[in-house]
Amino acid sequence: MRKKDLVKDNPLVDVAAYLFLEDIADKQGAAGMNTYLMSLAAALARSMPEEEYESWEDFVDALKNGDSALSTFEEVEMPTKHCVVTVESPFLRGWQEYTKRIGNFASIHYEVAEYYNSTVKPGAIDSQDIIIQTYRAEMAKRIKVEGKQLRVAHIATVAPDGTKKIAPDEWLPILLEKAGISQTMLNMIMRNNASVWIVYTE
Amino acid sequence: MLDVALVSLIQDMSEKAGVEGTIQYWLRVGENLARRMGKEAYMGWPSFNVALREGRTAFSIEGDVTALTDLAITDVDGDVVGYIYALRECVFNPTITRIRYSVGEVPEADRLVAEEYNNSIRDTAVCNFCVIHQKFRDEVAKNITVAGQQLESYQLADRGFTGETKIDKPNLKKIGVNEEYVRSLLRNYACVYAIIMHGARLKGEEEEE
């Protein structure tokens, strides 16, 4: 079964998961929640089988078709050989159901992102970004292309409410060069997509 | 994605906190979810059933719920005090399918949590998520009034991903519904429950006394 054929999740499960994370934060604060989010994503990546590809083209095909575990949960497009664009956040449906049924996304989801940005890597807007970015990084460790370890780096993310978070100025030119896109192209991509990231090998 | 990630954590959580610990966590999540949904009030059963059909009640987050209005539940005086409701698809089934085709298999902790819940709390779970879902329903019912009366949820029957069924015979007896009838509902529905006015004098309960 390919990604595009995966059935949609039930929002009750997603909303319950958000509340479970908030319950953790009540007891352990943003730091504890951050640890939980990162272990949640790492545990998921570890539960996936390892992958190996003979050529970069094979890997790109698998990624675009949703055959790689790296894109199992997201629909991706690749404007260049190394730039990956996630069309829609894999959390969008749960987030929409949460805001519809419960109200504003709890502030702890943003506070934990600030904690993550200052202690791990500056790239998250909310708790959802911590999960997906950690998952991508951990999953990449399980993939080899042409015998080399795959790596990922995050350029920008756009929250469901339109808030944007772009990599720090000192990193951006290097990331854009690796992605093979200009700053203007990045702005164009961010207008109607959820995140921009790169895949490469050393 | 969050659903699949959460399931991958159950195994780890159950190993660290024990399946009993996971159940306590899940019960709290179900309770919190219902509390965060807020309170609702309806003038009578028709307005509640219409709200349910239109997806306006807290129960509607479950998905496609049908009010079986031919199955009104009456009290000892013959007054309608509730109805039977049926959920088309188990809320956890899409997640199980997604796990099957993304990770490969559902962790064993899913079954262990359900078994422990069946042994220690009530014998109605077919998967770990039943713990959250059934608690959620119990608590949501308490937050809703129909004609000024607080509601109560009775779990009646459910069918799991692999076809396993659970039928709560004591609850069926209380509301006076035949077990075989509810079993036949499971051919077309995944989960069957009753919503009843809290404190109603049910025929089955009177007979027990």
Image (cartoon, coloured by chain):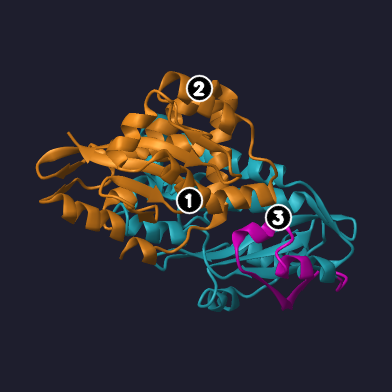
* Residue A52 falls left or right of residue A75: left
Residue A172 locus on image (x, y percent): 38, 30
Earlier in the chain: of badge 2 and badge 1, it is 2
Residue on which disc 3 sits? B58
Kindly identify which chain the residue marked by label 1 belongs to: A
| The C terminus of chain A, quarter of image | top left
Depth check, mark 3 against mark 2: the one in front is 2
Image disc number at residue A193: 1
SS label for mark 3? helix
Residue B79, numbered label? none
Which residue corresponds to the image point at 59% horizontal and 74% vertical from the top-left? B182
Q: Are marks 3 and 1 in contact (CB under 8 Å)?
A: no
Spatial CA distance of label 3 from label 2 is 33 Å
Q: Depth check: B1 or B53 in front?
A: B1
Can you say which quadrant of the picture contains the N terminus of chain A? bottom left
Return the residue nearer the eye: A196 or A120.
A196
| Amino acid, disc 2 | Tyr
Q: Which mark is residue A115?
A: 2
| Residue type, numbered disc 3 | Ala
- What colour do you see for chain B? cyan
Q: Which residues are magenta?
A: B50-79
